[in-house]
Amino acid sequence: MTTQKDRYQALLVSGLVNAHAVEKQALSIMTPQVSRIENYPEVADRLRLHIDETNSQIARLDEILAGFDTSGSTLKDIGLSMSGGMAAIAHSVAGDEILKNSFANYAFEHFEIAAYKSLLVLAEDGGFASATSLLQASLGEEQAMAQWIDETLPVVTRRYATLYTEEGSAAAKI
Ligand SMILES: [Fe+2]
């Protein structure tokens, strides 16, 4: 017989699988960005760190899902990874690629923050305490990354303007 707890667990698992796909998409957005950056090394360094964090977040989601006898890897992962790659290609055409990437990353981190906050509500209300500390750890990393992008946007924008006016658009682009 399916209990209310079972249905709650199914709801949480569905959310965890979605988050897993979102993190795969995050990797597919950040990885091509890092490889293209030339004149904004601190952005590349922070992205590399967040790629490592994102791999840890995927491992945490896998760990929680394994506890529910579920795997995180789905077809959804593949579809969203492809759309992430497409977004990176679209921005690479823009003359202000570094700025477009900053705006997109700012939005994406806040999407992830909302997703983890929602998962934490499900985990707490459903009584799945084992999931909450892992989800909290990932939420903290997303919030730190979002804050870094927020604080660094003025720096990146000013460097873009300086490079653009002193060295030309090609130097400023990425
Ligand atoms: Fe993130």
Image (cartoon, rainbow, N blue to C red):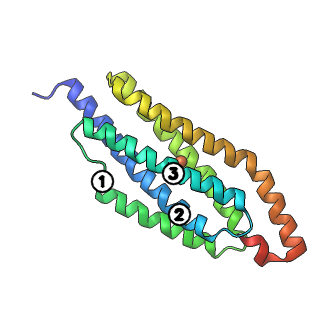
Q: Which residue is mark 2?
A: 31
Q: Nearer the viewer, mark 2 or mark 3?
A: 3
Q: How far apart in space, not on screen, are marks 3 and 1 (Cα)? A: 18 Å
101 left or right, relative to 26: right
Q: Which residue is mark 1?
A: 73
At horizontal 62% and vertical 73% (from top left) the residue drawn is 92
165 left or right, relative to 94: right
Q: Nearer the viewer, residue 78 or 167?
A: 167
Q: Nearer the viewer, mark 3 or mark 1?
A: 3
Find numbered disc 3 in the image and state the secondary structure of the residue it sits on: helix
Q: Amino acid at mark 2?
A: Thr
At horizontal 55% and vertical 60% (from top left) the residue drawn is 30
How many numbered marks are there?
3
Outermost residue to the left = 1
Q: How far apart in space, not on screen, are marks 2 and 3 (Cα)? A: 11 Å
Estimate how packed mark 3 is, as few (under 14), some (14 to 19) or many (20 or more) residues with alpha carbons within 10 Å. few
Using the image, determine if residue 174 lies above or below residue 77.
below
Q: How far apart in space, not on screen, are marks 2 and 1 (Cα)? A: 19 Å
Figure quadrant of the N terminus: top left
Q: Which residue is mark 3?
A: 52
Q: Looking at the rendering, which quadrant does residue 48 occupy?
A: bottom right
